[in-house]
């Protein structure tokens, strides 16, 4: 298993509410968002249940710095970042699961 972590963006819908987070376990963390494990969380409240962007970092310190950077970005910059990698705003979670040896639900 990799030793770094991911910075990711969840969205409620295309150009909807956005959430930026980081984790060393993207599969588990996105599953928690999708299943509203923390019902009072931002992602549960605003239905941010689509993984629309992620990037991997070998170093956790770099991951944390990148997360902070993206959180400070304005909304239009985040949207541009998403569109560059995922122009259709599709949920990347099923593909990520398959690529990492899991079976999508």
Image: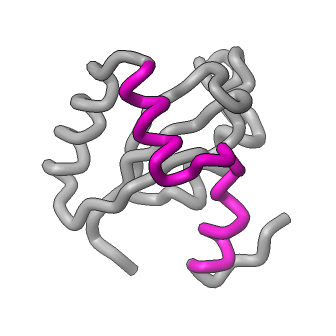
Q: Nearer the viewer, residue 17 or 36?
A: 17
Question: Tag count in the figure?
Answer: 0
Q: Quadrant of the N terminus?
A: bottom left
Residue 100, placed above or below residue 20: below
The percent position of residue 21, horizontal first and vertical second, equals 43, 36
Q: Is residue 75 above or below residue 55?
A: above
Could you tell whether 66 is left or right of 82 in the image?
A: left
Colour mapping: one colour
- Residue 86 within the segment the image draws in magenta: yes
Q: Give x and y (percent) for residue 42.
A: 59, 18
Q: Is residue 11 above or below residue 42?
A: below
Location of residue 89 with respect to 45 vertically, above or below: below
Q: Main secondary structure of the magenta part?
A: helix
Left or right: 11 with respect to 80?
A: right
Q: Which residues are magenta?
A: 76-99
- The part of the image, by quadrant, that contains residue 92 is bottom right
Q: Residue at x 68, y 42 (%)?
A: 50
Picture coordinates of residue 23, whole percent (x, y): 40, 49
Pick the front one: 28 or 47: 47
Residue 56 is drawn in which quadrant? bottom left
Q: What residue lies at 66% left-to-right and 44% top-to-bottom? A: 89
């Amino acid at each position: 298993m990799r030793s770094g972590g991911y910075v990711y963006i969840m969205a409620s819908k295309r150009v909807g509410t956005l959430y930026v987070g980081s984790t060393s376990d993207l599969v588990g963390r996105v599953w928690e968002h999708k299943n509203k494990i923390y019902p009072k969380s931002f992602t549960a409240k605003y239905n941010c249940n689509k993984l629309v962007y992620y990037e991997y970092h070998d170093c956790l310190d770099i991951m944390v710095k990148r997360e902070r950077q993206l959180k400070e970005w304005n909304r239009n910059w985040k949207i541009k970042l998403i569109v560059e990698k995922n122009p259709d705003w599709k949920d990347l979670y099923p593909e990520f699961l398959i690529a990492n040896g899991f079976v999508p639900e």
